[in-house]
Image (tube, rainbow, N blue to C red):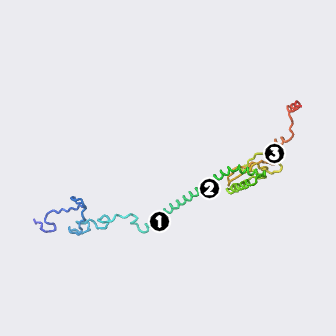
Amino acid sequence: MTDRPTGSEFGDGEPVVRDKRRIDPDTGSLREAPDQSGADGGTPGTPGTPGAAGTPGTPGGPGGQPPREPSDLAGPSAQEALLTEALSERTADLQRLQAEYVNYKRRVDRDREAARELVVGSVLTELLGILDDIGRAREAGELEGAFKAVSESLERVTEKLGLVKYGEKGDTFDPRIHEALLHNYSDEVDGPTATMIMQPGYRHGERILRAARVAVSEPTEQLPADAAKADGPVESTDDEQAADKSAE
């Protein structure tokens, strides 16, 4: 039996214990990184040899960087496609927001204009009675002096606000803008005609503030047969004749 030679690479036969803990159990502080110079017999950075803990700077080794994202590993063509897709999505979002803003602005402007028209129309409606008094005073020849100046100023203001007066003798009767207070038949008209303006009408824009009140005449040929008979002589009844005799 051959004895193990002394002084060989196996040492003197005593076991060797190496403490590779990074935290010192006595002080609790972090130990310095072990020397990778290969003093323990291994080649530094070589897997499978003592002291090999991975090549520094590689993923997973000491001082290594974390794995990169898939987009970092992709080539230039893939990155360009991703950027183009992201740009398209952002552009679509911006266009949608711009369209929503434009629609909102139009709706707000339309509502504001409608509210303004409603308020102005309400104020003008309250002034119609005063305008009627001015018109009657003008027809009677009583519109003179300071009263005339104030009346004309008021009429100019109402016209500036969009108030329009309508209704003239001879206008074709339109039930949408006229209100018939009297009705008769005449041989001088060809159709329903406003032959008398009892009260002028007023409108503000497309809104009728007050319909014109008129007397309407229709052609005589449209006179119903029952009405034509009523226009002839009416015979008195026996009761009426007896009442006349008693009166005599």
Image coordinates of residue 177 in percent, x first then y, are: 72, 50
Foreground of the two, 47 or 245 = 245
How packed mark 2 is, by other alpha carbons closer than 10 Å (few <14, some 14-19, many 20 or more), is: few
How packed mark 3 is, by other alpha carbons closer than 10 Å (few <14, some 14-19, many 20 or more), is: few
Q: Gap in Å between the C-alphas at discs 3 and 2? A: 48 Å
Image coordinates of residue 146 in percent, x first then y, are: 73, 54
Q: Gap in Å between the C-alphas at discs 3 and 1? A: 81 Å
Q: Is residue 234 above or below residue 75?
A: above
Q: Is residue 192 visible?
A: no
Circle on res. 223: 3
Q: Is residue 39 above or below residue 159?
A: below
Q: In this image, 221 relative to 103: left or right?
A: right
What is the quadrant of the N terminus in the image?
A: bottom left
Q: Earlier in the sequence, mark 3 or mark 2?
A: 2
Image coordinates of residue 245 in percent, x first then y, are: 89, 31
Q: Are marks 1 and 2 in contact (CB under 8 Å)?
A: no
SS category of the residue bearing label 2: helix
Residue position for label 1: 84
Q: Nearer the viewer, mark 3 or mark 1?
A: 3
Q: Is residue 72 visible?
A: yes
Residue farthest to the left, as pictured: 1
| Quarter residue 244 falls in | top right
Q: In this image, 219 relative to 71: left or right?
A: right
